[in-house]
Amino acid sequence: MEKKLGLATRDAYGKALVEIGKSNPDVVVLDADLSKSTKTEAFGKEFPSRFFNCGIAEANMVGIAAGLASQGKIPFLSSFACFLVNKGFEQFRMAVAFPELNVKVVTSHGGISVGEDGASQQSIEDVALMATLPGFKVIVPSDEYCTRAIVMESVGIKDPVYIRTGRPKAPIVHSPRTVFKIGKGVLIREGKDVAIFANGLLVWEALQAAETLASQGVSACVVDAHTVKPLDEELIVSLAAKTRAVVTAEEHQSWGGLGSAVSRLLSERRPVPVSCVAIQDTYAESGKPDELIEKYGLTSAHIVKAAQQVIRRKIAGAEKHSCAS
Amino acid sequence: MNQFAYAIEELQQKAKEIRRDIVKMLGIAGSGHPGGSLSVTDILTVLYFHVMKHDPKNPKWTDRDRLILSKGHAAPALYAALAHAGYFDHELLWTLRQMGSPLQGHPDMRKLPGIEASTGSLGQGLSIGIGIALSGRIDKKDFRTYVVMSDGEMNEGQTWEAAAFASHNKIDNLTMVLDYNKFQLDGAVKDILWMEPLAEKWRSFGWDVQEIDGHDVTELQRALQKAKTVTGKPTAIVADTIKGKGVSFMENNNNFHGVAPTAEETERALKELT
């Protein structure tokens, strides 16, 4: 598969937002002095009366969004993932999740692919934090097509939604014809020996891993599991049943992300060997995105290794089982 | 136009009835916050029975004025005021804090008509009120948003983020009323985190500020009406109050911040409030 870089997912968000603004007068946008980076700036230029730059005051911004939502507006609020989620978390809990308000939180600079700015700007906890808030839907789109579709769909649903976008240009893993639905994974590649569930930039790495595995005679299926909550339980359970070996891959702390969610689901409904490719309980550092992905264990090579490991465990389990019987 | 439009004596009488209900509710519930509920009673009475444009029979009326009780622990005062205005059956008051009751320990907007925001985590109400006021501006509605805050909430950084935003954006359809009773949970505000000069702080943040006696219904009326005429900036009314107002043994006695009266204390308090 040839690597073709598309828009950064944050750029895809910014473009979608302007489209939404044209068709839906209830949509308002708030930013915390990062609109040039989160790409909400274009909306602000197009619809100045519906754009509020709140300054570097995230907690207040979340509260304002809650007030707007309580009156029937559909606020989108954006900043870097680490700042908005961490500094606004208590407000997301009290003013948005608890009263079940229709607020869309779309952050940029998710994960460590932020790069040179370093650990203070890289968000590795946001998915876990937002997923713990009752009622919130949590989505990590992979490329520009996925991002656009998810952002467009989010306008039409009444629940609070968290969407994490990224800074670097994202490799295209879908086509303009791919159909996306919040809560439904996209099966990109069929396979029978191991199932890889990935989201964000790691979907590309998973597809690369599947190619490598194929060259070794291992057939891997790859799913873009963009929605971490609600998880596409039926798809995950059915592919686990079919392959009996599962790998997850995400640009997030291993605690509380996609890997945790998939592991919990499968331990309850279809126990199979699972290996989680994620950041191992540590902060990263400054560096080029590719260097960081390599050092912190998130490349296709790491996914291949994880796949080989779960397949070995699957075979060992089957042998043990046959000995016992 | 307020549909009650109570005169001074009627407001004073209504405030007394609300105070009686607060004491009785808390006595039955066995837990809750008497001090801050009694200090804010006159403020809420004047707002609901003289100043605010609202319709208890139509709580979602789009042109209504909105009130957010940011100091959510004073919920009994809000519930009693709403019941007296006719938002729900007065008998519901006696279910405060019980399992299944819409009268939650702190206000829950999903459960009870007339509650504009769920509160209880201090320092968030002003931001929410700004959002509501902004929606009115976008929709070109002329309703007003009132946010009632506690002095403890002046400790919270979010309050000052909101204060700066409101003046920068000239949000003049917003009135903040501070129930300045000088106590917070752990003791006197001056011993915990003294925020004086408070009126000056609001002024320096670009707000129109009035300092009044928060138990004088005439002063409250005048200040709240005057706030409606201020253009280009939001209004802060620093209302001097007494914690536990109206019950001699609760006044300025911070032991009644978050402890309900016993049966005997309830009886004594109700006698004082006749």
Image (spheres, rainbow, N blue to C red):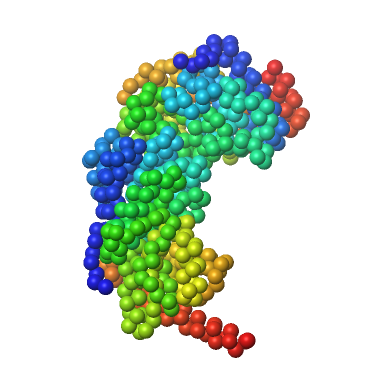
Q: Is residue A27 or residue A121 the one in the foreground?
A: A27
A177 left or right of B196 in image: left
Q: Is residue B72 visible?
A: yes
Q: Residue at the spot x=49%, y=22% of the render?
A: B54
Q: Residue farthest to the right?
A: B264
Q: Position of residue A167 (x, y in %)?
A: 28, 58
The C terminus of chain B sits in image quarter: top right
Image spot of residue B167 (x, y percent): 34, 31
The answer to which quarter of the image holds residue B162 is top left
Expressed as whole percent of the image width and height from the top left, the position of residue A106 reads 36, 50
Asked where in the image residue A44 lies, by quadrant, the reply is top left
**What is the x, y in percent for residue B18?**
62, 22
In this rendering, is residue A187 above or below B136? Answer: below
Q: Residue at x 71, y 32 (%)?
A: B28
**Above or below, comparing residue A114 to residue A102 in the picture:** below
Q: Which is more toward the observer, A48 or A64?
A: A48
Q: Residue at x 27, y 40 (%)?
A: A22
